[in-house]
Amino acid sequence: MANFSANIKSAAKVADRVEEYGLQFDRMSFIMDLLACDGENDNLKIDWPRFIAATQGDFMHDVQGIYNHLNRTTGHLDGCFIPRFAIVE
């Protein structure tokens, strides 16, 4: 079972921006996807301020990558996908 970070407000801001682009998606499921990727389940933490302020291309790269590569059972990003706004320490 996946674990989730507590950065709900930041994840909601990302979801708000996705809505601004007119994309159809399940908001709550997407927020849970983002929280599963934020330093949980062997994923790197997300740099929320940079992600939220990113150019459209970089922003959508991470949105689509998370959507396409997240294993929703384990919460791990598969396929060697690393978000551009992951914090690499």
Image: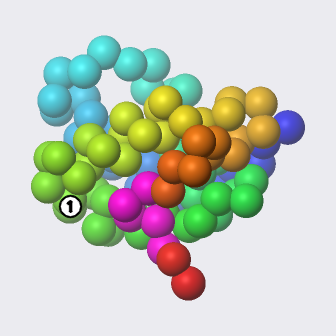
Say if 36 sits above or below 7 in the image: above
- Residue bounds of the magenta highlight: 83-87
Residue 65 colored in magenta in the image:
no
Task: Please name the amino acid that badge 1 sits on.
Answer: Ala
Q: What residue is drawn where x is 60% and y is 37%?
A: 70
Say if 85 sits above or below 63 in the image: below
Residue 1, quarter of picture: top right
Horizontal placement of 58 versus 11: left or right? left
Pointer 1: what residue?
53
**On-image quarter of the C terminus:** bottom right
Q: Position of residue 19 (x, y in %)?
A: 24, 29
Q: Is residue 30 visible?
A: no
How many numbered discs? 1
Horizontal placement of 84 versus 43: left or right? left
Q: Residue furthest right?
A: 1
Q: Is residue 47 visible?
A: yes
Secondary structure under tag 1 reads loop
Horizontal placement of 39 versus 56: left or right? right
